[in-house]
């Protein structure tokens, strides 16, 4: 449980960054007024972060209600996960209500799993045979990663930053195949 809480705390900022793919900056839980056009939000990451936030806060609020603990001053999900791992895990494990202990374990475990989804998108991984990364000085094998939301990306096994969306990769692959000589365009039916 402590390891899962520390994982959520360590990856929370990365998960926030993943909300806006390619933005170079994701923001925080407290949104400031923007003067430029908003960047599109990655819905799968947003859904994952919602589950993580709800699960961590469920544990925290139950501790406040049942044990009267004082919350830390800074209360974003990552800092609360760190706070739980440092000073509240023993209280959770030793709670008189073992249902709370069991539920907390599963909420925290689930939060860590969704944090993986938000930061890596890795849920199902399949290697792509006979294909290597085309980035200069890389040449590592490629794999297809499908997250819990069903989105697929093609990713380099050597450097996870070398990624391309599945649709773009499959279009590039089709375009690189040699065309048959004398191939005719398909006939369209009459309207």
Image (cartoon, helix red, strand yellow):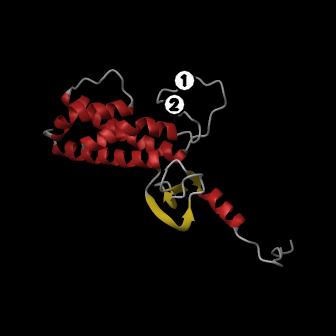
Please give left or right for residue 65 compared with residue 22 in the image. left
Please name the residue that numbered disc 2 is placed on.
Answer: 27
Give the left or right position of residue 164, taking residue 157 as reference.
right
Pointers 2 and 1 in contact (CB under 8 A)? yes
Residue on which disc 1 sits: 32
Q: Secondary structure at mark 1?
A: loop
Residue 15, image x, y percentages: 45, 40
In the displayed structure, 163 sits above or below 183; it is: above
In percent of width and height, residue 80 lies at: 32, 31
Residue drawn at (41%, 37%) of the image: 12
Instruction: Determine the secondary structure under disc 2.
Output: loop
Residue 82 spot, x, y in % from top left: 30, 33
Residue reaching furthest to the front: 137
Residue beneath the point at 48% across and 65% down: 127
Query: How far apart are the alpha carbons under marks 2 and 1?
Result: 9 Å
Crowding at dot 2, Cα within 10 Å, few <14 / some 14-19 / many 20+, comes out as some
Residue at the extreme top of the image, as rendered: 73
Q: Residue at x 49, y 58 (%)?
A: 146
Give the label on residue 127, or none.
none
Toward the right, the furthest residue is 190
**N-term-proximal mark, 2 vs 1:** 2
Q: Nearer the viewer, mark 2 or mark 1?
A: 2
């Amino acid at each position: 449980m402590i390891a899962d809480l520390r994982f959520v705390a360590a990856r929370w900022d990365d998960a926030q960054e993943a909300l806006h793919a390619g933005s170079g900056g994701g923001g925080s839980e407290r949104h400031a007024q923007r003067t430029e056009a908003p960047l599109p939000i990655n819905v799968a990451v947003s859904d994952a972060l919602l589950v993580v936030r709800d699960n961590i806060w469920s544990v925290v609020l139950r501790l406040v209600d049942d044990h009267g603990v004082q919350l830390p001053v800074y209360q974003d999900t990552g800092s609360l996960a760190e706070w739980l791992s440092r000073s509240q895990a023993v209280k959770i494990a030793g709670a008189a209500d073992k249902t709370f202990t069991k539920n907390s374990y599963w909420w925290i475990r689930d939060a860590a799993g969704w944090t993986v989804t938000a930061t890596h998108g890795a849920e199902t991984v399949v290697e792509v045979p006979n294909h290597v990364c085309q980035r200069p000085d890389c040449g590592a094998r490629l794999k297809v990663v499908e997250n819990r939301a069903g989105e697929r990306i093609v990713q380099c096994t050597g450097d996870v930053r070398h990624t391309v969306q599945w649709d773009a990769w499959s279009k590039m692959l089709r375009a690189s195949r040699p065309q048959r000589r004398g191939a005719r365009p398909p006939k369209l039916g009459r309207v």
